[in-house]
Image (spheres, grey):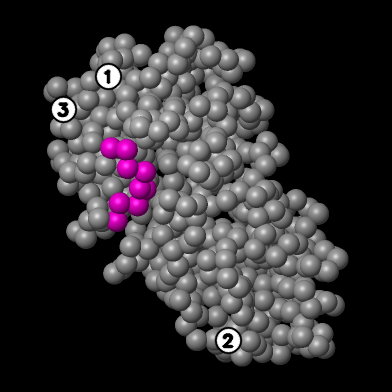
Amino acid sequence: MDMIVNPIIPGMAPDPSIIRAGADYYIATSTFHWAPGVVIYHSRDLMNWQQCATVLQNDEIDLRGTNTPAGIWAPHLSYDETEKKFWLAYSLMENMAGREFNAQSYAMWANDIKGPWSEPIYLTSIGFDPSLYHEAGRHYLAILEWETRSGYQAPGHLAMAEINLSTGKLMGKWHRLTTGFTTRGCIEAPQIYKHDGYYYMLAASGGTGYGHGIEMGRSKDIFGPYESNPTGEPILTSSPRHLFSLGDPDAGHFEMFNPHSPLQKAGHGSLVETPDHEWYITHLMSRPLPGTKLNPLGRETGLQKVRWTKEGWLELEDSSNLAKLEVPAPKAAANAKQNFHANDIFTDFATEDALSAFFTPYHLKNKSWADIKDGHLELYGGNSFFSQVAPSILATRATSFKYSLQVKLSFSPNHYSERAGTGLYYDSNNWLYAYLALDDKEEKLMLCLMQAKLGERLTYDFDTVPMPDTPIELRLDYNYGTVKVFYRLDENAAWQQLSGSIDASYLSDEGVNGEPGEIGGFTGLFNFIGAVDAHQHDSHGNYYYYQVTSAE
């Protein structure tokens, strides 16, 4: 039997929403403070996935000033068979302070999954995690209604209304359906499916940490009432032991860490049926660094095979609810092989398409500061990397616990504030940067090292090396949370180490400083190239290649 090994999409790929169109499968994932917003992946076998599109790439959103972990949350893909349109619903989380959670929810449509996509259609500000269900020309919007009243069960009700998608206007009232199908609490992300005459609601619960799971209820009427899965427990989780946390806002639930599971935080799922009538559920998951509860790769996308019981409820194929590392592949994927190095990256910046693989924090990339010229990348310096407005950063997701990041660049600064280099990045408060810059007397070009940890700037004043004004190569070796930095002046020369091992394990969801009351971040580690110029914004680093290679 051919097996699929989880995660199917490694690195930051949370809140997966899956659909099938013919023989093609598509998954949309959250992007938070990263642009372009909402990534879509494609597969023909449920085993091997490649990025095929991004949706919010034309200034539809403004992420400047976004605090971790706000931004673009929980995109939901659907297909309207009547109008032959793909739909995407998502939330823009603008504020989490005071646990007010102010989010605007929108929908967009396209005739082709790769776009072009319509302008966003405003739906509601009632909460977050919207999803759309289409049936016989009618459309329904399900969402978490965020609760702000004292003495009421948080985070609120799962609510639904019929909606006119041409205008975004509700057609009638909101129907409050449930505050959850188990005692895990933190209910969110409702999604509707129809099977054998029942409407089934899937929902995430238990917070997005170690108590996470997927719950299920069903009804003969789309507006309920919904009966709970008779087990009283999630249909999928990494921690099957009972949890009572109704009204508890804790998203971490570190007490639910399951030391016997290689996959943690399994939850927030989405269903798909294959052409051979096999059923699978995608879900977010995490893999902590060994011996820790730190997850540098963030929340990744996993997959489990499920089946319908004779009573009409979903369960995993082995009748349990514990997420597995390996799952049976679909019949149609017989003899397919999983490519574990599919996320390795190499670009020599020879064409404009080279930049499509890169994401930027807080704002979109554009040619005013990132441009391909004469077969290399010119990256102009912007704000400090502590900025949540316009840092000049191009980044790719870290997808392995052991890998090398390697670049070749040249740089000719004329002011002490100008820098160009490469490093690791989580958010504006947490990063590691190896860079070229002038010394304090503005006389010599130096290779330097700087770090941001929980918003504090750390400099390595004794780990600097003079550099010639010629191209050099930099390499960062990431090994299960530690980093070593190397350089060389010639491709045939031996690598020289710049510093000792640096602890970068805090560049993880649990290690960073997020909003009060939250676990820190919900995103993940990125590799990046970046430039800073607090002088005239006219200096630029020349980058000749960018390479990330997994060593696992």
Range drawn in magenta: 246-254
Chief secondary structure of the magenta portion: loop
Q: Is residue 360 above or below residue 421?
A: above
User: Are there few (<14), some (14-19), or many (20+) residues within 10 Å of tag 1?
Assistant: many
* Kind of residue at disc 2: Leu
The residue that mark 1 highlights is 226
> Foreground mark, 2 or 1?
1
Residue 3 in sight in this render: no
**Does the residue at mark 3 contact the one at mark 2 (Cβ under 8 Å)?**
no
**Does the residue at mark 3 contact the one at mark 1 (Cβ under 8 Å)?**
no
> Can you tell which mark lies on residue 498?
2
Percent from the top left, x then y, of residue 161?
45, 16
Label 2 and label 1: CA atoms lie apart by 61 Å
Residue 120 in sight in this render: yes
User: Are there few (<14), some (14-19), or many (20+) residues within 10 Å of tag 3?
Assistant: few
Q: Nearer the viewer, residue 292 or 95?
A: 95
Percent from the top left, x then y, of residue 363?
68, 49
Q: Secondary structure at mark 1?
A: loop
Q: Nearer the viewer, residue 322 or 452?
A: 452
